Image (cartoon, rainbow, N blue to C red):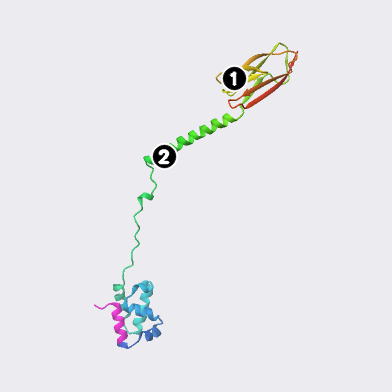
Amino acid sequence: MKTIGQVLKEARAKKRYSLKRLEELTKIKLNFIEALEKESWGVLPPFPTVLGFVKSVSTALNIDEKTAAAVLKRDYPPKPEAVNPKPDAASQFVWGPKLTFMVGVGIVLAAIAGYLIFQYTKFVSPPALSVVSPKEGQVVTEGFVTVQGNTDTDAKIIANNQPLITDQNGKFKIELEVSLETKEVFVKAISRSGKETVVSRKIEVE
């Protein structure tokens, strides 16, 4: 059984046509005609174009077009199918025990770092201090005035150079002795790092 290349080459030889002559008749490049006769599919265009070449050459060589087309379809190599490579399992995201452990460790480390930063910031910052008594410009008719407020739990409190005691929540309250010469009450909160916060309230002793 003859191949399409043999059929075309023998018909051309029978007609005594050179490749150049067949190129002139069909307007197909000589190298394509030669590739058809040698069945060098790799250097030829896609199948639809090759089929058109075969039909043109068949007409020029008085070969039945349908027969030549059928032989071509039989001989033309099948188009290689695209093969989808098997997905690399390693590239797929998988949540496993190892990742859970690493995430857990990361959360713990972040929590520790956050706590240390908070503690350091608190250590180097002045303590909070709120004084609810005495009020600014308060008139005192007795020999003492109530000093009351709230501060950080680890801060020291001094009112007019007199140390005060705070409870576990940082609250303090004391009856501070005053005299006619007392014009102001200074409340000072001192942190462990030595940072100070001072609130002063002017009073009028009568």
Residue 15 locus on image (x, y percent): 32, 88
The residue identified by callout 2 is 102
Instruction: Give the residue drawn at x 32%, y 79%.
Output: 37
Towards the viewer: 59 or 27:
27
- Amino acid type at image mark 1: Lys
Instruction: Report which quarter residue 188 is drawn in.
Output: top right
For image coordinates 69% across by 22% down, the residue present is 200
Q: Position of residue 97 (x, y in %)?
A: 37, 39
Mark 1 falls on what kind of element?
strand
**Which residue is painted at 62% across and 20% down in the image?**
157
Q: Where is residue 43 in the image (x, y as percent from the top left)?
A: 37, 74
User: Which secondary structure dominates the residues rendered in magenta?
Assistant: helix
Position of the C terminus, as image quadrant, is top right
Could you tell me how many numbered marks the image carries? 2
Numbered label attached to residue 171 = 1
Residue type beneath disc 2: Met
Spot the residue most to the front: 194
Q: Residue furthest bottom?
A: 16
The magenta-colored residue range is 1-13
- Can the viewer see residue 106? yes
Which element carries disc 2, helix, strand or loop? helix
